[in-house]
Amino acid sequence: MSNDRSDFNYDAIPEGYYDRIARGGNSVRRAWHLQKFERVLDCLPDQCPAILDVGCFAGTFLSALSADRFPLQVGVDVLPKQVEYANANYGTEFRRFVYIPSVAELGDIPGTFDCITLIEVIEHLTVNEIETLLARLYDKLNVGGKLVLSTPNYTSSWPVLEVLVNRLSSVSYEEQHLTKFNYFNVEKRLREISPLVGVGLRVEFKTTTHFVSPFIAPLSLELSRSVSRLYPHNKWHFPFGNLVLVRLEKIS
């Protein structure tokens, strides 16, 4: 979450780019984003007094959350124009979006949280940045709180999809993705990166999502969504879905 890690210019991404895709873009890409958010939401408790979404971009995920279930919602990102867009379109009395220059400044966000989400963020960071990020989030998470993260699964068809998207889209994922994970190594790599994982942060479960459901969307968005919800996340152990989903709990 800093703008000097790679040659990719994050500031060149148009304001609200992914938000517009999620709300009315190509059917496959729209289903991809909406189902990703739904699966993350499934991993969160029924009541979460305070939630922090790190790498919120244009605010799409938090915009789908109710005030009854999530009374306090904070999104943070390193892209000021995207944060401005998020506040203009989705800011409310209970939901706000904050610009931070890098993950190191997460400690400046006031308060602590019961839930923290990292939706396709860690692959954009160096190993050192991920270590710093997890340390800051550990400090921000209440004991018993949940940290839910998703990241591309590089033992799935994702590498092929990445090549296709890079060729067909103006946004290159090859330039953005710096640290790669897969279903089989994600726990081990997180432990290697951060001494907190397995000690203060316990991995509750890992799963995958987006194996086939988004690609049904051209036939029917509703059918695509139904397929994505056939199995609860804690019962789906297939290792080759295109996204890895991990939930951790702060135990001390």
Image (spheres, helix red, strand yellow):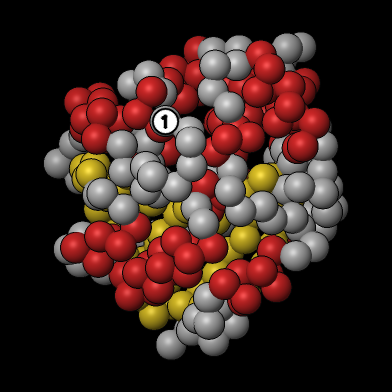
Residue 43: image quadrant is bottom right
Q: Between residues 38 and 140, which one lies in front from this camera angle? A: 140
Q: Up-down: is 56 above or below 87?
A: below
Q: Up-down: is 107 above or below 149?
A: below
Quadrant of the rendering where the C terminus is positioned: bottom left
At numbered mark 1, what does the secondary structure look like: helix, strand or loop? loop
Give the image location of residue 75, x and y in percent.
31, 46
Q: Up-down: is 102 above or below 30?
A: below
Residue 216: image quadrant is top right
Residue 211: image quadrant is top right
Q: Between residues 70 and 134, which one lies in front from this camera angle? A: 134
Q: Tell me what residue is drawn at x 33 percent, y 75 percent.
A: 139
Q: Tell me what residue is drawn at x 58 percent, y 21 percent.
A: 30
Which residue carries the number 1 mark?
9
Q: Tell me what residue is drawn at x 73 percent, y 22 percent.
A: 164
- Circle 1: residue type: Asn
Q: Up-down: is 93 above or below 107?
A: above
Camera sees residue 76: yes
Q: Between residues 207 and 233, which one lies in front from this camera angle? A: 207
In the image, 54: left or right of 121?
A: left
**Label 1: few (<14), some (14–19) or many (≥20) C-alpha neighbours in 10 Å:** few
Give the image location of residue 196, x and y in percent.
50, 81
Give the image location of residue 132, x and y in percent.
41, 68
